[in-house]
């Protein structure tokens, strides 16, 4: 009887070890262990007195930026990534400051990113153009950053999951203050054109925002794993 009990306990122990081993393997293979050591700054562009672009459907860029950014934050945190937001409500970072609030706002965003020293900073924006026919997400990087170029191309590819017909390429820029002044890998994701009615309507749609957030997170994962 004793040997039978011992045999049952041994079988249960082995079964438990197999289950733990399987779960650990899935946890490691999913990248959670690696991602849990990473820090990402998500920067929802504009806010407060600065609405950003105004869509042909009257949507405000600042609102869409924050909505998408919050979805990205949630998905990343579910994967174990430490996420720092430059803003989590409708505000400028320069409230109460002196001089140009827009300039001060940008300086505060850059300071937060540099002080935090994340593995990656992603700024969420919406685009606009004089012609309503232009559409498609596009990722920008600092002209003189080889690493920024590589990361922007990774993100641009990830965004194809929401629009497989988007032929836009990652683009270099030397004028964006955020790209020029940050000391860590930084990219700007322009999710779409608010000047294009069809795309503007998508950008305010909850389902489409979720798709965008998933694509951006996929891009961030690939950037961090690279």
Image (spheres, helix red, strand yellow):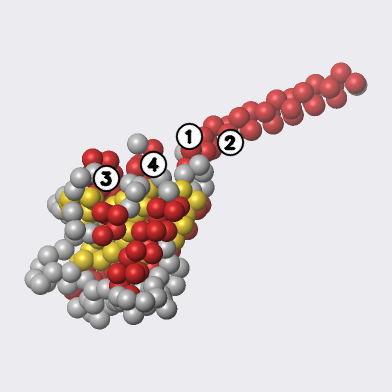
Instruction: Please tell me whether mark 3 sits on a helix, a strand or a loop.
Output: helix
Disc 1 versus disc 2: nearer the observer: 1
Q: Residue furthest right?
A: 1
Give the mark, 1 or 2, whose residue is nearer the N terminus.
2
Give the mark, 4 or 1, whose residue is nearer the N terminus.
1
Give the mark, 3 or 2, whose residue is nearer the N terminus.
2
Please give the name of the residue rendered at 18% of the width and 54% of the height, measured from the top-left corner: 174
Left or right position of 90 against 163: right
Give the mark, 4 or 2, whose residue is nearer the N terminus.
2
* Whole-number angstrom distance, CA of label 1 to CA of label 2: 10 Å
For label 1, the residue is 29
For label 3, the residue is 148
Please give the name of the residue rendered at 51% of the width and 35% of the height, measured from the top-left corner: 28
Q: Is residue 195 visible?
A: yes
Q: Position of residue 61 (x, y in %)?
A: 29, 72
Residue 155 badge: none
* Whole-number angstrom distance, CA of label 4 to CA of label 2: 23 Å
Give neighbour class at mark 4: few <14, some 14-19, many 20+ (Cα, 10 Å): some
Instruction: Please tell me whether mark 1 sits on a helix, a strand or a loop.
Output: helix
Figure check: 14 above or below 53: above
Q: Position of residue 197 (x, y in %)?
A: 18, 73
């Amino acid at each position: 009887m004793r040997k039978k009990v011992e045999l049952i306990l041994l079988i249960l122990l082995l079964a438990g070890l197999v289950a733990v081993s399987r779960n650990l393997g899935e946890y490691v293979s999913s990248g959670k262990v690696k991602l849990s050591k990473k820090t990402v700054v998500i920067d929802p562009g504009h806010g407060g007195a600065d609405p950003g672009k105004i869509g042909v459907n009257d949507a405000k860029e600042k609102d869409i930026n924050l909505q998408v950014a919050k979805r990205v934050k949630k998905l990343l945190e579910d994967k174990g990534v430490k996420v720092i937001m430059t803003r989590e409500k409708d505000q400028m970072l320069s409230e109460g400051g002196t001089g140009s609030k827009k300039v001060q706002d940008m300086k505060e965003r850059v300071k937060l990113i540099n002080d935090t020293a994340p593995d990656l900073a992603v700024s969420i924006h919406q685009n606009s153009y004089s012609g309503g026919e232009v559409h498609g997400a596009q990722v920008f990087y600092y002209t003189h950053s080889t690493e920024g170029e590589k990361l922007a191309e990774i993100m641009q590819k990830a965004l194809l999951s929401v629009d497989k017909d988007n032929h836009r390429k990652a683009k270099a820029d030397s004028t964006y203050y955020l790209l020029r002044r940050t000391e860590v890998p930084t990219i700007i994701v322009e999710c779409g054109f608010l000047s294009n009615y069809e795309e503007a309507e998508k950008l305010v749609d909850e389902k489409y925002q979720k798709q965008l957030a998933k694509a951006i997170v996929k891009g961030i994962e690939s950037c961090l794993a690279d």
